[in-house]
Image (cartoon, rainbow, N blue to C red):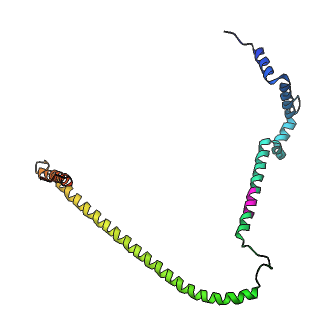
């Protein structure tokens, strides 16, 4: 097994990236950090304390751009919604004169109001009757279900009392248990085609 030389790795990197790209990266980093000596203590403190330093952070700049872009889209959307909800106004030359409209609409509105009042009352009464019928039907169905549940519950309660009856020595009374089994067998035979019992 060969041992790799650390110098060989650097040579490989230079072959892949090329020596010029390495130098360019170094130069960019040095420029970003403020020269060969790095940042002085004063420059570091000033950069941290200034609120304007946030403008040099590319991540913050990107977020701000995105925020303003989204805000612009939202405002455009709201303007379009307002335009859609406003009634379309026709220019004055397309609209008929107001005096003509008032006289024609006045007579039509009187007739329509009388008809609409009668029809509205009729509609209201029809709907009310339908709702009353529906509520009566619902109440009847609920009442039937409730009675059915009560009957079934009382049957189960009676059967349970019989099944749990004991003799004076503490043994279960077999009479009711055998009757229950017999009813179950008869019920299953009654459902099938054989009715010999």
Q: Nearer the viewer, residue 96 or 80?
A: 96
Residue 100's place in the image compared with 56, above or below, is: below
Q: Residue at x 71, y 67 (%)?
A: 84
Which quarter of the rendered picture does the N terminus lie within?
A: top right
Residue range of the region highlighted in magenta in the rendering: 73-79
Q: Nearer the viewer, residue 161 or 49?
A: 161
Is residue 40 visible in the rendered image? The answer is no
Q: How many marks?
A: 0
Q: Residue at x 19, y 56 (%)?
A: 159
Report x, y in % for residue 127.
Answer: 47, 77
Is residue 100 visible in the rendered image? The answer is yes
Report x, y in % for residue 98.
Answer: 75, 85
Q: Quadrant of residue 97?
A: bottom right
Residue lying at the far top of the rendered structure: 1
**Is 78 included in the stretch rendered in magenta?**
yes
> In this image, 129 relative to 16: left or right?
left
Magenta segment's dominant SS is helix
Q: Residue at x 64, y 88 (%)?
A: 108
Residue 135's place in the image compared with 161, above or below, is: below
> In this image, 158 relative to 55: left or right?
left
Report x, y in % for residue 168.
Answer: 10, 51
Report x, y in % for residue 179.
Answer: 14, 53
Q: Residue at x 84, y 27 (%)?
A: 26
Q: Nearer the viewer, residue 58 or 126?
A: 126
> In this image, 105 relative to 172: left or right?
right
């Amino acid at each position: 097994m060969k041992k790799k030389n650390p110098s060989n790795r650097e040579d490989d990197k230079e072959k892949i990236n090329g020596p010029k790209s390495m130098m360019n990266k170094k130069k960019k980093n040095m420029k970003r950090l403020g020269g060969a000596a790095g940042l002085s203590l004063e420059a570091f403190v000033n950069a941290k304390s200034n609120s304007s330093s946030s403008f040099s952070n590319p991540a913050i700049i990107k977020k701000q751009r995105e925020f303003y872009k989204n805000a612009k889209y939202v405002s455009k959307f709201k303007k379009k919604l307002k335009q859609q909800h406003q009634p379309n106004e026709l220019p004055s030359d397309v609209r008929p004169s107001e005096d003509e409209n008032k006289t024609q609409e006045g007579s039509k509105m009187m007739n329509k109001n009388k008809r609409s009042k009668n029809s509205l009352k009729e509609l209201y009464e029809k709907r009310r009757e339908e709702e009353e019928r529906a509520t009566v039907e619902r109440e009847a169905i609920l009442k039937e279900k409730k009675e059915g549940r009560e009957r079934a519950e009382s049957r189960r309660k009676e059967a349970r009392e019989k099944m749990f009856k004991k003799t004076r020595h503490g043994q279960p009374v077999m009479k009711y248990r055998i009757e229950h089994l017999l009813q179950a067998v008869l019920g299953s035979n009654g459902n099938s085609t054989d009715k010999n019992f």
